[in-house]
Amino acid sequence: MAGAELIGQEEIKEVMDVMRTGVLMRYGFDKERQGVFKVRQFEGEFAEYCGVKHALGVTSGSAALKVALTAMDIGPGDEVLVPAFTFLATYEAVLEVGAIPVMCDIDDTLNFDPNEIEKKMTKYTKAVIPVHMCGSSARIDKIVKIARKNKLMVLEDNAQGCGASFKGKKLGGFGDMGIFSFDYYKTVTTGEGGMVISNNKKLYLRSEWYSDHGHDHNPKVSRALEGRTILGFNYRMNELQGALGLAQLRKLDYIIAEQKKNKAVIKDALAQIPGVGFRTLPDPEGDSATFLAFNLPEEKQALKFQKLLSQGGFDTTCYKSNLWHYVPNWEHFLAFSTANSKKYPFKDKGYKGKVKYSRKSIPFAEDMLGRTLVAGIAVRMSPERLDAICKAIEKAAVGL
Ligand SMILES: Cc1ncc(COP(=O)(O)O)c(C=O)c1O
């Protein structure tokens, strides 16, 4: 559960700063807010933490994806390459901007396979969305290199990998843009919330305008008199979220350090079992350790092991059968059932490409996800709990 486990006095203090002024909106009310700008401060500290120039707080990770794709000018007629293993939101966001998501295979990192770019791109492809699933990085250096070579933009979906890095650089800052989620399950939580980051000022400004009805946020005039270039919508983060984010961000390194310790204990126990392998981490140092993914040689064995572990009180997920994180299981998506009766954008005449979402086109995911089990790692795991998990693993191994 990460950040949610640690909500305490620090969050209360930050939230109370806002409550004392009564100004819940991030913009305007300059006199009443008495210098309190929690979202602005959170954005500044988050950008610094990630080592990027710009950060924009928004209402959710899903909104962040949509805002970023819009800023990148992805729209009708365009295709975007997306891994088959991700949360639905990544695909929904592409559809929200009127573009078509093209399903790509994963590799042994369980993330976007860089070799898929040149296999799956067409003349309509505009961007790639590598998703750093379950807290650890894709081969992001290769992905960016191949994307650049083919003049494709890169948007990193780092909703699940806040604080994780690759070779010393925080994830989210490798591509043209990156996004984060702060929903209640995430490593840093603001209840609901998200962040868009970028080093590109133009993309940042377009994001900022779009997320607030086009307002250009000119500090010299009142909100009513601000200029505008593009139309937008409302994806503004509010001050209570900003306050929570500030307190949570200051705990992020501690969260990761604790999760790493807990993960190492469980991983060691699993490593004793013949046949058990682990997800490849391109940079183990940079792992945020929110999850531990391990595999068995065959799917049948993995499912049996999962059952035995569960009987011992240690629950895991097999994502091949998960209804929300694996494209072949999304019956509504496969039926092109977008939330409009015209099935836009799948059936839009402006879209000239052809997409298929067949299991055959993602052979690695079909094999590896079926024999991989994923366990959530908490920040607070008592020695007794870790011991019970290790015992459950030992016992399940006997029954394998
Ligand atoms: C990979 C991924 N992308 C995007 C999102 C969407 O984030 P949110 O729940 O904040 O809308 C999630 C949320 O679980 C996610 O896991």
Image (tube, helix red, strand yellow):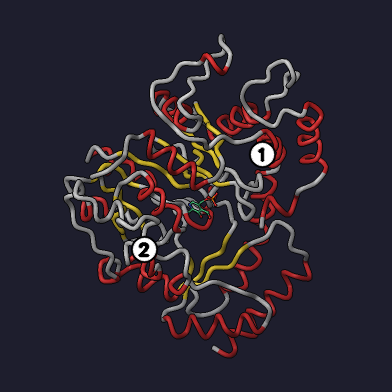
Quarter containing the N terminus: bottom right
Quadrant position of residue 362: bottom left
Residue situated furthest bottom in the rendering: 399
Q: Position of residue 53 (x, y in %)?
A: 49, 26
Determine whether, in the image, residue 33 is placed left or right of residue 75. Answer: right
* Nearest to the observer: residue 157 or residue 97: 97
Identify the element where label 1 is drawn: helix
Q: In which quarter of the image is residue 371?
A: bottom left
Number of other residues with Cα within 10 Å of mark 2, as a class: few under 14, some 14 to 19, many 20 or more: some
The label on residue 333 is 2
Q: Where is residue 128 drawn, in percent x and y?
A: 32, 46
Question: Is residue 353 found left or right of 258 in the rendered image?
Answer: left
| Residue at x 58% of width, y 73% of height | 316
Identify the residue at image location x=64%, y=50%: 256
Q: Residue at x 39, y 21 (%)?
A: 229
For residue 67, side relative to residue 103 (left or right): right
> What element does badge 2 sit on?
helix
Q: For mark 1, what is the residue?
A: 241
Residue depicted at 36% across the width and 43% down the height: 97
Q: Nearer the viewer, residue 384 or 187?
A: 187
